[in-house]
Image (cartoon, rainbow, N blue to C red):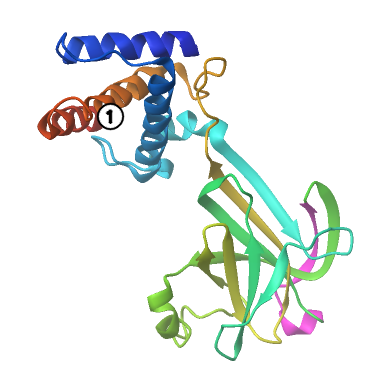
Amino acid sequence: MNSTELIQAFRIGVDKVSSLSNPSFETDEILFFLNKAKDRFEENLYLGRNSTGQSFDETERVKKALAKLTEGWSRGINGIFSPIEFSTYYFVPYPFSGLKIDLPSDCKYVLREYSLVTFATSTECITATDLTVTVNGLPIAYSNAKILPITAVRHNDLANLLQDPFIKPDNNTLLRIDVEDDAHVLLYPTNTYTISAYFMQYLRSSDSITVVNTYELPDWTHQKIVDIAVSLALENIESVRTQTSILDQIKND
């Protein structure tokens, strides 16, 4: 559907469910509910709030639906990058250090992430090797390098995890905590290696629906957006029970 058809479908949906005495919605109001609905729908897809309970990585249909919102992103410490996206984070207990990463402004959910680290010499890590990777669109060669997975952890678990010999950061893994809405901190052993690059795949927020911009996800999702938008609009003019019933029905579709 284009934006005009989405607006018309919303009006038809409201007329089907609500009484004739309810007021009509202006175009701006309809667009408000459609945009609220798309945000909720994308969140439900990612988190698996559906009849199957399958989240982003568990079903091909969901991955295809969100494919347009999937972005790749990389940053590195190197003289050619300006400004540097890494900065020291001081509130990490010794013998660990933290590196703060400012994320892209449109990042909504992190899907996958890993880091490239470099050792001073090849003897410090027998699995380190010479690697050439693309960082920020440019090929860069690293010596004595290794790709490490990153594990996200909660703040209230951090103290225990840093003492756990099987989980704490070492030559094979990094930990990550969120410190702001748009920033991560990578935790790594002090004076062991250097974090040289960070790679991430994430879901961005979809563009707003306007009178000229339609919803960018596949066509099969458009009617679901309309259904959610109608249920949100009815919250203002009908009982909470009506809203709950419609949202439950949408969730189970």
- Asked whether 208 falls inside the magenta stretch, the response is no
State the residue at coordinates (89%, 58%): 80
Q: Is residue 32 above or below residue 168?
A: above
The image position of residue 172, as x and y in percent, is 59, 74
- Which of the 4 image quarters holds residue 229? top left
> Which amino acid lies under the numbered mark 1 shown in the image of this protein?
Leu
State the residue at coordinates (17%, 15%): 18
Q: Residues within 10 Å of mark 1 (few under 14, many from 20)?
A: some
State the residue at coordinates (67%, 49%): 73
Find numbered disc 1 in the image and state the secondary structure of the residue it sits on.
Answer: helix
Q: Mark 1 — residue? A: 232
Q: Is residue 221 visible?
A: no
- Decide which of 24, 136 is in the foreground and name it: 24
Residue interval drawn in magenta: 121-135
Q: Is residue 239 above or below residue 2?
A: below
Residue 77 relative to residue 189: left or right: right
- Which of the 4 image quarters holds residue 225? top left
Residue 145 relative to residue 113: left or right: right
- Decide which of 142, 66 is in the foreground and name it: 66
- Asked whether 126 falls inside the magenta stretch, the response is yes
Q: Is residue 30 visible?
A: yes
Q: Is residue 170 above or below residue 203?
A: below
The image position of residue 199, as x and y in percent, is 66, 56
